[in-house]
Image: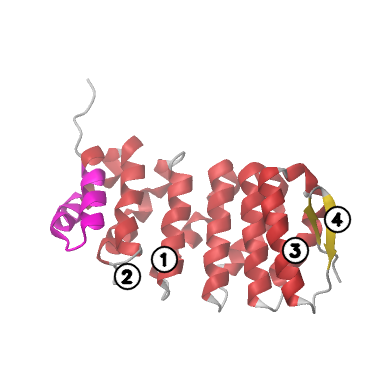
């Protein structure tokens, strides 16, 4: 049984047993908050937090993923030991856990891309997940990493281009052009193959899709520097 420690006003507020799911989720939320703002306060409990990534309760498990993402944005090396487990969780039967695990990997990768490099193909394969929120998490996680390492995503461009026609028009289709824009900003050569599909999106019924498609095309089609 692990102790779960959270802080409020720099004092200990909770020690909860795994059977007390609600208290555990609240404590994990506080750990995530403190871990982002003052990560030094949670450094010593990271080994205990890893146990919650295997909790049988999906809400606890997803909250633990969130906590690792928040800590990882600030201190990625501290949470490196959790990356293999987070990667396993992107195949979890519950969509919320898959979503939060992918989001956490994106946060860690944003802070230090090399930590997640060997797992990238497993992340972007979830671009075909049945749940739109998971597909959206894939796009946003890849955006975080691609901002620094666009060349790592050369083989994923066809997957991202397919998301331009995603059936989820509220979130996924709106965000799909953005990953192409982010990659194209530094490596337009990698995403020029997606230009015809982006041009199609200029007549999409959704104004946000049209705007984001135009933004991606602007960086892809900009003149080469002399």
Q: Earlier in the sequence, mark 2 or mark 1?
A: 1
Residue 110 position within the rendered picture, expressed as x and y whole percent measured from the top left: 53, 44
Instruction: Assign a secondary structure to mark 4.
Output: strand
Q: Residues within 10 Å of mark 3 (few under 14, many from 20)?
A: many
- Residue 196 vertical position relative to residue 224 in the rendered view, above or below: below
Instruction: Assign a secondary structure to mark 3.
Output: helix
Quarter residue 55 falls in: bottom right
Residue 74 position within the rendered picture, expressed as x and y whole percent measured from the top left: 64, 42
Q: Earlier in the sequence, mark 2 or mark 4?
A: 4
Q: CA distance from mark 4 to mark 3?
A: 10 Å
Q: CA distance from mark 2 to mark 3?
A: 33 Å
Q: Which mark is residue 165?
A: none
Residue 127 falls left or right of residue 23: left
**Foreground of the two, 75 or 77:** 75
Looking at the image, is mark 2 or mark 1 nearer the viewer? 2
Q: Is residue 79 visible?
A: no
Instruction: Assign a secondary structure to mark 1.
Output: helix
Residue 11 falls left or right of residue 166: right
Magenta segment:
195-217
Residue 181 falls left or right of residue 130: left
Quarter in which the C terminus is drawn? top left
Residue plotted at (59% across, 62% down): 87
Residue 56 falls left or right of residue 140: right
Q: Which mark is residue 27?
A: 3
Residue hosting label 4? 12
Q: Which mark is residue 135?
A: 1
Residue hosting label 2? 168
Instruction: Assign a secondary structure to mark 2.
Output: loop
Residue plotted at (34% across, 56% down): 175
Quarter residue 133 falls in: bottom left
């Amino acid at each position: 049984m692990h102790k779960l420690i959270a802080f409020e006003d720099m004092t200990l507020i909770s020690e909860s047993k795994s059977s007390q799911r609600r208290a555990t989720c609240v404590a994990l939320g506080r750990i995530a908050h403190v871990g982002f703002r003052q990560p030094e306060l949670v450094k010593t409990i990271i080994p205990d937090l890893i146990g919650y990534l295997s909790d049988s309760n999906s809400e606890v498990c997803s909250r633990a993923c969130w906590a690792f993402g928040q800590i990882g944005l600030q201190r990625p090396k501290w949470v490196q030991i959790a990356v293999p487990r987070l990667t396993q969780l992107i195949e979890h039967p519950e969509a919320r856990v898959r979503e939060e695990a992918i989001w956490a990997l994106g946060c860690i990768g944003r802070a230090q891309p090399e930590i997640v490099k060997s797992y990238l193909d497993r992340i972007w394969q979830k671009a075909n997940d049945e749940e739109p929120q998971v597909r959206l998490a894939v796009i946003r996680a890849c955006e975080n990493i691609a901002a620094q390492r666009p060349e790592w995503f050369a083989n994923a461009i066809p997957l991202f281009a397919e998301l331009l026609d995603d059936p989820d028009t509220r979130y996924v289709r709106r965000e799909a052009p953005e990953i192409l824009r982010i990659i194209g900003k530094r490596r337009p050569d990698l995403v020029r193959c997606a230009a015809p599909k982006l041009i199609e999106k200029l007549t999409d019924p959704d104004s946000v899709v049209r705007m984001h498609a135009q933004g991606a095309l602007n960086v892809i089609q900009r003149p080469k520097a002399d």
